[in-house]
Image (tube, grey):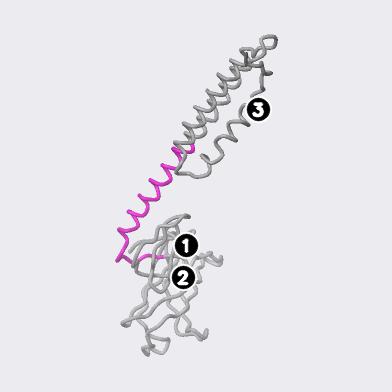
Amino acid sequence: MVNPIQSSPASSLFSSINTANNSATTSTSAAPTSIATTQDTFLKLLVTQMQNQDPMNPMNNAQITSQMAQMSTVNGINQLNTTLQALSSSMTSSQSMQAAAMIGHGVMTPGNTVTLANGSGIGGFNLPQSASNVQVAITDASGNPVTTLQLGAMGAGVQNWQWNGMDSAGAQVPAGTYNFSVTAMQGASNVAATALTYGVVNGVTPGATGTSLNVGANGLIPLTQVQQIL
């Protein structure tokens, strides 16, 4: 004759399940197996518990219902996690495919450098509101003034500009990387402009935190930082 055992509370049953399935829940890839194993273990323990319960102190319906409800909750959470992981993977894959279409295209991302090549340089800025007067001051690597571009009135949003490589005296300056700053005014009030640097996308790098673009000398730039595609 099997010795009767005391009815175990729900917490005890789930403690046994957690111990039995410790290795099954240690990796994301094993999630479906973990769910099936947890359900099987739960049912086996519940049946065993009912078969060996103390006849003088049997499990009541409330205990069984409570344990079944908790199992249903755990199962639902596991299934939700699996669904979210699949959705995240799908979104990352879709994002990488969209980013791949940018290869060979120019993009504007936050930065205050302009590359002069073949007598031309491109830069940009983002205005939170329209400005009645905008100017771009270009300096060399040592901080010496090179020239100032007077752009006049500009609308809100992302704007770009082009430099012909001439200094303030009209002389052609050497190719290379220069710095610039943007000053925007609306009447007598300053408008906070965000400087944008231009670069051509050479490749795409998927990562755990999102997709990044290889933008030549600008390095790896998160896709989320792209403010304009040219």
Q: Amino acid at mark 1?
A: Leu
Of callouts 2 and 1, the N-terminal one? 1
- Mark 2 element type: strand
Disc 1 vs disc 3: which is toward the camera?
A: 3
Q: Position of residue 75 (x, y in %)?
A: 51, 30
Location of mark 3 (residue):
12
Q: In percent of the image, x 44 and y 57: which residue is there?
A: 207
Location of mark 1 (residue):
127
Q: Position of residue 7 (x, y in %)?
A: 66, 18
Q: Amino acid at mark 3?
A: Ser
Of callouts 2 and 3, the N-terminal one? 3
Are the residues tagged 2 and 3 within 8 Å (C-beta)?
A: no
Q: Residues within 10 Å of mark 1 (few under 14, many from 20)?
A: some
Q: Residues within 10 Å of mark 3 (few under 14, many from 20)?
A: few
Disc 2 vs disc 1: which is toward the camera?
A: 1
- Mark 1 element type: strand
Q: Residue furthest top?
A: 56
The kind of secondary structure the magenta stretch mainly shows is: helix
